[in-house]
Image: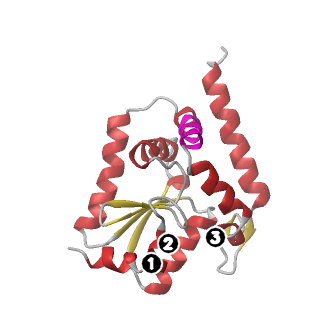
Amino acid sequence: MKRPILDRIASSLFNLEMDRVESSSVVDEQGRVGEPMSWAQNDSLANKFSKIIAGNDLGYKFKQWVADIVAGEYDEEKIEAYAKDFISNAETSGVPIAMFSFTTCPFCRGAKDYFDKEGIDYVSLELDELDGNLGNEIRSVLGKMTRRTSVPSIFVKGTAIGGLNDGTPGLMPLVESGELNNLLLQQ
């Protein structure tokens, strides 16, 4: 029996992405396997491209459409509650940062490296290590919650701040402006 066209598109997109990640993966200085850390630099082509796509409504709609197709059919309310519970459980347990991440993503590893270097407590949910299609479902829901389907998706005390270099406004812009410390100190 043939699968519906959207299922075939979703499978093709997912397989293309996995092939791209696998073919570009390297081992970084800390022994982690993933896309090159240089891609996460603010002035890299990968980062500039990401900002252009994420910085306009058409780019967001396209990325959300892809995330929705890859996620397939799922209980959106249940997955949204799961994501929100992860965020609130971090805050309730006194951990100021909750992050949704992929282990192979250089932007995610860059955010973790920053938190580790600065001694900032965080919890990270590795979407690519979750069972079944749960990670893709969460990514689709996060897109609807934050208008960003890319990772990392970082929350400081329950408030979405974006990714490493971009978003609303992003981790490193908050660090550079001194606002991250203000957010961490707020009660």
Of marks 2 and 3, which one's residue comes earlier in the chain? Answer: 3
Type of amino acid at the residue the image marks with label 3? Asn
Residue 185 lies left or right of residue 177; in this view the side is: left
SS of the residue at dot 2?
helix
SS of the residue at dot 3?
loop
Q: In the depicted view, which residue is nearer to us: 164 or 59?
A: 59
Eye-nearest disc, 3 or 1: 1
Q: Decide: is 185 above or below 64.
A: below
Residue that label 2 marks: 173
Of marks 3 and 1, which one's residue comes earlier in the chain? Answer: 3
Give me the disc on residue 177: 1
Image quarter hosting the N terminus? top right
Dividing the picture into quarters, in which one does residue 48 lie?
bottom right
Q: Decide: is 5 above or below 84.
A: above
Colour mode?
A: secondary structure
Q: Residue 89: percent from the left, percent from the top?
A: 27, 61
Type of amino acid at the residue the image marks with label 1? Ser
As drawn, the residue found furthest toward the left would be: 187
Type of amino acid at the residue the image marks with label 2? Pro
Q: Do the residues labelled 1 and 2 touch (CB within 8 Å)?
A: yes
Q: What residue is drawn where x is 27% and y is 66%?
A: 91
Q: Which residues are the magenta region?
A: 57-66
As drawn, the residue found furthest toward the right would be: 23
Q: Residue 43: percent from the left, percent from the top?
A: 68, 70
Distance between mark 1 and mark 2 Cα atoms: 6 Å
Q: What residue is drawn where x is 53% and y is 55%?
A: 129
Residue that label 3 marks: 42
Distance between mark 3 and mark 1 Cα atoms: 15 Å
